[in-house]
Each structure stands twice: as structure tokens, then as C-alpha cells.
Amino acid sequence: MPFDAMPEEADPRFPATEAAPLEALFGLPAAREQQPAPARAQPERQEAAATQPARLEAERAAPAGGIATFMYARLNNFTAACQALSGAELTSFVNDVRRVLSTAALQLGGEIAQRRPDSILCAFCHRPEDRIPNHAKRALHAAILTVHESVQLGARISGQLQAAGLPPVFIAVGVHLGEGEVTARANKAQGMVHATGEAVEIARLLEVAAADQHWSVVTSAATRQAAGTRVESGRSGSLGLPDDTFIEVVEIAGLVPRKGSTTPQSHYAALHESLATNQQLARSAQGTSQGANATPGGHLLIEDYRLLRKIGEGGIASVFLAEPTAGGPQQVLKVLRLDNPDSVLGLQRFMQEFALLVRIDHPNVTRIFRQDFSAGVAYIAMEYFPMGDLRTRMRKAMDPGVSLYYIRQIASGLEAIHEVGIVHRDLKPDNVMIRQDGIVAIADFGIAKQVSMQITDTGAGDIVGTPYYLSPEQVIGKPVDGRCDIYSLGVMAYEMLTGSKPYRAGTARELLQMHVDAPIPRLPPAHARLQPVLDRMMAKDPADRYESASALLDDLGKLG
């Protein structure tokens, strides 16, 4: 496809945001507007055209900070392809890669900042002759065309690669509009420039995300917005940056024809097909070169979600607050990275948690919406509780009626999970969440265990749970059933009614031993009618406890 098939002039169909100063998107001072040059006679225009290269060179000689769009593209498996070729064929391939990586960018007004045999970094800046800033559009157009040409090149050598048992070549492109500095190189070598700044590094990270996610072109949402309506979007998600912030990212799926365009529709269809073909090549290459042990580039990318902030870290997963890009209420994403040695065991427990919870539909148990994999992570999407957990309500003794209200609800949630054979094993105020209507729900089943499962994922005799709320049988390493959760609820009940924990000690070892042999604590006289219930909930021997949460609910019902 000829590169001049894609016109570069401003499109009146673009949204108003593109005509506005792009600095506003990044909170930067607005650049001074350039006044249009007065009309000149034809001879003067010819003279200006003759001196334009010198004028542009003078402009590039000075540092140029501000907003620009950066494109970083890399041809994956380039080295492997070179090993399969030799002689004139190898020379032709290397030269073709150089041409493919640079031609579209240069034709669309980009400047090369870094060039290696398998990759290129280009800067697209605002040009004085452009009525409105259009460098984001030009960069994304160049990215799409580069993918198209790369696919054509890969097809020409696919036979040799297959014969040698080598993975196919595929390209990944990251494009980002942001604050950066573009200056001419001191030696003026081949018109190349220096490009520095955060936007450059984000473009590089987007390229890595594109390769990991098997998206041909990945751009930030702000860049996609600035590019206007002629760029077709695909999937979307959030990308975690090294500083623990997030940016929304979008997959680029093709170009939309300009109204009244004379470019054949087949050209646009060919671009769309090339982007899809490149994705297939990326998946095929992963299966050939890395297989099931493939690991991501270390970043975090969750498809179909907009990450808002990190709200927790611990155990085997990180926890994020997120919004579905398709709309709907905020959700909590529990995310497990798959790029460390503990991932296998962690994934087993992670998948177990989902398998346990997805079977339960009860108002007093956290709702689970989805489990999936995305760019080297596994995640579970679950209900978000903006009111926080029960711990926030337990800073002092609660009203007895409120305490019983919560105890009944927690017991009802335990009844639901015990009915499907699940033991929570880490029930505590921090794992009981509060909805806006006051209903509470049991959460965090990270160490829950299905009684029927023949699996010891924490090791025989290991203590799992929180020391203040552990049952005696957990302390001494005996088998557990639903009655251990009833004990933990008894500890919580005492704390809700009195404002203090039933057992305190100088060391964790002493505290654990108190669960085993210290007397059951006495409630204040005002709560004496609840003492028999607490005695059965916190009995040291499981045989003396309520045999089920249902039996506990029956006794609580008799209290009125």
C-alpha cells in the first residue's frame, strides 16, 4: 500500500478537543499562539519554499520542550530470523526492516530519535504549517502503516522460519502523547534528534505492553482522544506505571475512511486485517518460543478495567480499586502476578478462592463478578465496599442491639459457606465488609479451605489465620471444620460487646496458648444473658461448640 494513500491535512470531522491546545490535557502552560503569516505574492512563496529547509533546521537547533507524540516500535524475533537467513537474503531482510520501521514515520512528519536494527523511536512534533496540532493522529497513522508493512515483510520469510522451527516475526508499537523534549543532535547526523522525557519512557512501556498483550498498537487514552475520529479503537484497560500510578490504554484496530475519501475501501480493510494478523503472529510466536512458561515484561495491564488506585497489598496478591470500562459500579480487583517463583502455588490458592466463592450467592458473602488472566497476571473481580470493614465500627463497645445485628448476619454468611463445604479459617473484623445499606458480607477467602479437598496447600501443622481470632484447634494444628469459624465469631462477638479483645499477651506464642487453655472470658453483667451463647461459641473443645452456624442462629433467634 502506498504511504501517500493516507492524507495528512486536518479533518473537519475531528472533535473540538483536537483543535484545542493539547497542553490543557496535561496541566501545562499554554503555548503562545502563532499568528498566521500574511498572504504573499507567488514569487515570495517560491522564495520562502526555497529557504524552508534552512528555517526548519534553525528551529530544530534550539531545545524544544512541551507536548509531542512519541512512537516506539520493535520487531520481535528479529535475531532469530537473521539466524535463519544468510547471504544476500539476510542483507535484504535487514535493509527491509530498516525501511519498514522508518518510512511511514518519516512520510508522516516524524523525526527519528533512536534507531537500532530491530527497533525505532520517533518523535512527532507540532509543525508551524499545521493549523491545529495533529501529531497524535500522524503518529498513530504511522504506527498502523508500520504494522501493515511489517506483516508483509514477515510473510516473505515465514517459510524459512517455519522450516527452521523458529517463531514468526511480529511487531509491537507503543504511542504516547505527553511532555517531552526534542532537540537536534549536535552532529546533525542524518537529521536525527534527541528525545527525552517521561512521555518517551511511557511509549517504550506501551510497546512492551503491546507485545505481552498481543495487541499490535497500544496507545494511551489521551493520545487516542487527541488523534480524533479517524482512528478506530479496540480493547481497553489500565496500565500500571513504575511509580504505582495508572494510565488508561487503548488498542488501535484500524483507520476510519475520511468522508468523501477517494481511497479504496480495500486499503482500510487491508490495514485492519494486518493489525489482526500481527496479533495472531504474536500469539503464535509466544507458543513457539516460550510456551506455557511465558512471563510478562513486569508491568501491570488489566484489560477491560480502569484502575483507580491501589488499596491493599499482602499475602499472595495486590488489591486495586477499578471501574469496568464498559460501565457499572466500581469493583475490587485482586491481582496475582505470574512472574515470580511462588506463582504456581499462589495461583493454585488464588484459583481455589474463586472456585469456592463463585458457588455462593448470599447477601452476607462478598459477590464475585469475574476471574480472568491479563498480560501475565491472574485476577478476581469482586464487590467493592466504600463503607469499609467492621473493624472501623469496633473502636469502642457497640450497642448490644447493633452487636447482635452484625453477629446474626455474619452467622448467616457462615451458614451459607459451610453448606457448600467451605471453612473460612481467617474470620476477623477486617474480613467483614459493610455495604451502604448496613448489610455486612464476609470477604477475603485467601486461606479458606474446602473440607472435602485432599490438599494441604499450607503444609501440615502450619498455623494460618490471625492470632487474635484463631481457634484452639488451629493453634495446635488439628483438622478444622466450620466450628473453627464459629469460635472466631465468638471472639469478635466479645470484642463488639466490650470494646476489647478477650485475650492479650506479651508475645504471639503466649497469645496462641491462651486460646488453647485460658478460661472463656466473662461478659459484663449488662450482657449476662449472652454469656451462655458466648460459652458455646468459644468452647475450647469443638465438640462443645455449636455444631453449625444454623444452630447458633436458632439460639440467637430465641434472644429476640
Image (cartoon, rainbow, N blue to C red):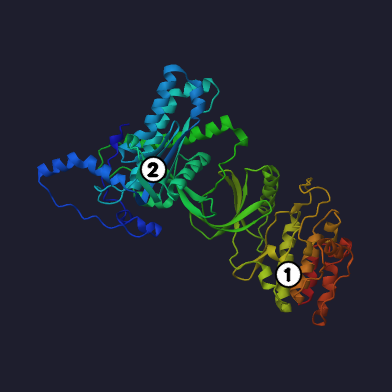
Q: Quadrant of residue 483?
A: bottom right
Residue 372 vs residue 421: left or right?
A: left
Q: Residue furthest front?
A: 186
Measured as percent of width and height from the top left, residue 314 is found at 67, 55
Residue 408: assigned label: 1
Mark 1 packing: few (<14 Cα in 10 Å), some, or many (20+)? some
Q: Amino acid at mark 2?
A: His
Secondary-structure class at tag 2? strand
Q: Quadrant of residue 494?
A: bottom right
Q: Residues within 10 Å of mark 2 (few under 14, many from 20)?
A: some
The single residue placed furthest to the top in the displayed view is: 87
> Nearest the camera: 414 or 214?
214
Residue 510 position within the rendered picture, expressed as x and y whole percent measured from the top left: 85, 63
> Can residue 396 be seen here?
yes
Earlier-in-chain disc, 2 versus 1: 2
According to the picture, the residue beneath numbered tag 2 turns out to be: 194
In the rendering, at what x and y percent does residue 541 appear?
89, 62
Q: Looking at the picture, which amino acid does disc 1 mark?
A: Arg
Please give the name of the residue rendered at 67% of the width and 47% of the height, measured from the top-left corner.
351
Query: Is 391 drawn above or below residue 194 in the view shown?
Result: below
